[in-house]
Image: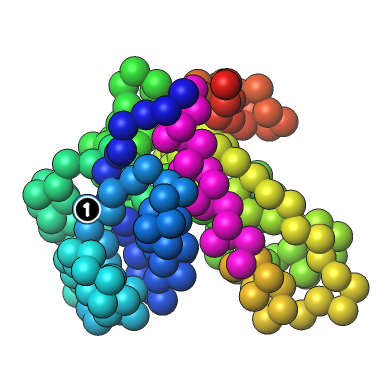
Amino acid sequence: MKQMRKSIVILASGRGTNFKAIYDAIKEGKLPLQIEAVVSNILNAPVCGLARELGVPVIEVPHIGLTKQEHEEKLLKALHFFRFEWLVLAGYMRLLSEDFIKKFWDEKRNISCILNIHPSLLPAFPGKKAYKQALQYGVKVTGATVHFVGFGVDDGPIVMQRALPVKDEETYESLLDRGLKQEHALYPDALSALCLRHWEVRFGKEPGGRSRIVFGD
């Protein structure tokens, strides 16, 4: 079921590779989205220069020297200038507070309007350095997960997951490289499904009580 083009704002802190993957999918006509702005908590982050080169508005809201509350208040003021469907976290290296998340709550679906991609098959390996966690644990398969943001670390309803085999000779660097390439394909695919297909939230049906997005035709 086709939907009208939706608007998003991207929050990012680093190089902007996931932002670029989303941008490219839009330009190629694969993703019916409009990027209203890139907002970064890092002054002069590479993602900011990349977005400017591509003609995407950039707002920098540095967090250095501010408390979490002070920074999020400034972030909310910056976001107030834009109308958008979803906040899309693309390498945003800050945990959002519950109060902030509640500002972007979909009361009808009872989920946030904030999306994130995490480099593991959640609920496995939440938090930082997920690929390193996978190697240290010795798993044979890892992957990536797109999910709506909840109040805990890397929780919230799962939108889409994709598995990635771990090779016998795998290093952290090689797994990170292959994992990033997978993320760059998965994020646009998940956003496309949310835009183009009927979906609903199935609460607490996954192992451990995890909720999941269920897609229809």
Give the residue furthest to the right: 168
* Left or right, residue 142 beside residue 102: right
Dominant secondary structure of the residues highlighted in magenta in the image: helix
Query: Measured along the vertical axis of the image, is residue 44 above or below residue 145?
Result: below
Q: Which residues are magenta?
A: 181-198
Report the quarter where the C terminus lies: top right
* Left or right, residue 26 beside residue 75: right
Q: For numbered disc 1, what is the local secondary structure? A: strand
Residue 36 visible? The answer is yes
Question: Residue 183 at what x, y percent from top left?
Answer: 58, 59
Question: Residue 198 at what x, y percent from top left?
Answer: 49, 22
- Residue drawn at x 41%, y 50% is 29
Colour scheme employed for the rendering of this structure: rainbow
* Left or right, residue 200 beside residue 15: right
- Residue drawn at x 81%, y 60% is 165
Q: Quick check: is 90 in the magenta stretch?
A: no
Q: Which residue is denoted by mark 1 in the rendering?
A: 36
Give the class, few, some or many, for how many residues have Cα within 10 Å of label 1's Cα (few <14, many ≥20).
some
Query: Measured along the vertical axis of the image, is residue 105 above or below residue 88?
Result: above
Question: Residue 46 at what x, y percent from top left?
Answer: 34, 80
- Residue drawn at x 69%, y 56% is 143
Q: Please name the amino acid that badge 1 sits on.
A: Glu
- Residue drawn at x 81%, y 57% is 141
Query: Measured along the vertical axis of the image, is residue 34 above or below residue 4?
Result: below
Give the residue furthest to the top: 108
Give the residue furthest to the front: 29
Viewer-nearest residue: 123 or 215 = 215
Residue 155 visible? The answer is no
